[in-house]
Image (cartoon, rainbow, N blue to C red):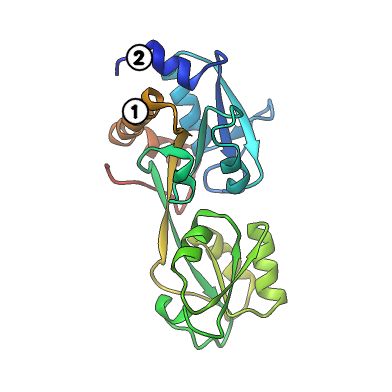
Amino acid sequence: MPMSPDIIAELAPTGVLRAGINLSNFLLVTGKTSMGDPEGVSPGMALAIAQRLGVPVKYLTFKSPGELADQAGKGVWDIGLIGAEPQRAETIAFTAAYAEIESTYLVPAGSPLKTIADVDAAGVRIAVSGRSAYGLWLERNIKHAQLVPTDSIKDSYDAFVGGKLEALAGLKPQLLSDVETLPGARILDGKFSAVQQAVGTAKKNIAGAAFLREFVEEAKASGLVARLIAQHKVRGLSVAPAA
């Protein structure tokens, strides 16, 4: 892949690749290094990008994807690794997804809700982590049910249980853990969406965005993404198809 000065100037204007990392996604950030840096699939992708550019990487961590997205185009981070959503794409130039995570619902014991489609009905309250990629999808697509947004994944679980809500929206791997704590609860079959984990940069970075798109396709085709998933022993995360 050709490396032009324009790409370096756009993606590492300070001489370092500043990578925005969302700490709330436990599939993509699975721990910390001895130096305190985030560890996992998305930090691994950021490191690989920095190595290709020939610059060091600096991780900038955010408690939620919404907080990371809020800094788009403000010179805080050079690349951001979060779910690609239409609202975010207004300010961020995204690659195609490098990995996908299924999103579905958990319902309490005795729930009459049997299918994904059943959930979008009047009188149904859905606990959801606000401004998450799947939460943004629900905001655009839910027509009849009521969304109950919270500040975090844990808060959405607490709201679901404490408020005796009808459904909890979440990433399937997290719900597989949650269901074990709630006797009689069920995870509905199928998915309402698949969160598309991608790499983004500021809209103005035309050359940088093109480089990132090529890099992500190569990372999928070469097995890099699959190796990172295997290395960090992540269940529930799959390599996205070629763009």
Q: Position of residue 7 (x, y in %)?
A: 40, 18
The residue at which mark 1 appears reads as 210
Q: Amino acid at mark 2?
A: Met
Q: Quadrant of residue 53?
A: top left
Q: Quadrant of residue 165?
A: bottom right
Q: Nearer the viewer, mark 2 or mark 1?
A: 1
Left or right: residue 240 compared with residue 103: left
Compared to 23, does 140 lie above or below? Answer: below
Q: Position of residue 148 (x, y in %)?
A: 62, 70
Please report the residue visible at 30 percent of the width from the left and 34 percent of the height from the top: 217
What SS does tag 2 mark?
A: loop
* Residue farthest top in this picture: 5
Quadrant of the drawing holding the N terminus: top left
Disc 1 crowd rating (10 Å Cα; few below 14, some 14-19, many 20+) is some
Left or right: residue 96 compared with residue 232: left
Question: Between residues 183 and 165, which one lies in front from this camera angle?
Answer: 165
Q: Position of residue 228 (x, y in %)?
A: 44, 36
Could you give the CA–CA distance between mark 2 and mark 1, rounded to whole angstroms?
11 Å
Question: Between residues 51 and 177, which one lies in front from this camera angle?
Answer: 51
Q: Which callout, 2 or 1, points at the residue further toward the start of the chain?
A: 2
Q: Is residue 30 visible?
A: no
Q: Position of residue 169 (x, y in %)?
A: 54, 67
The residue at which mark 2 appears reads as 3
Please report the residue visible at 47 percent of the width from the left and 22 percent of the height from the top: 11
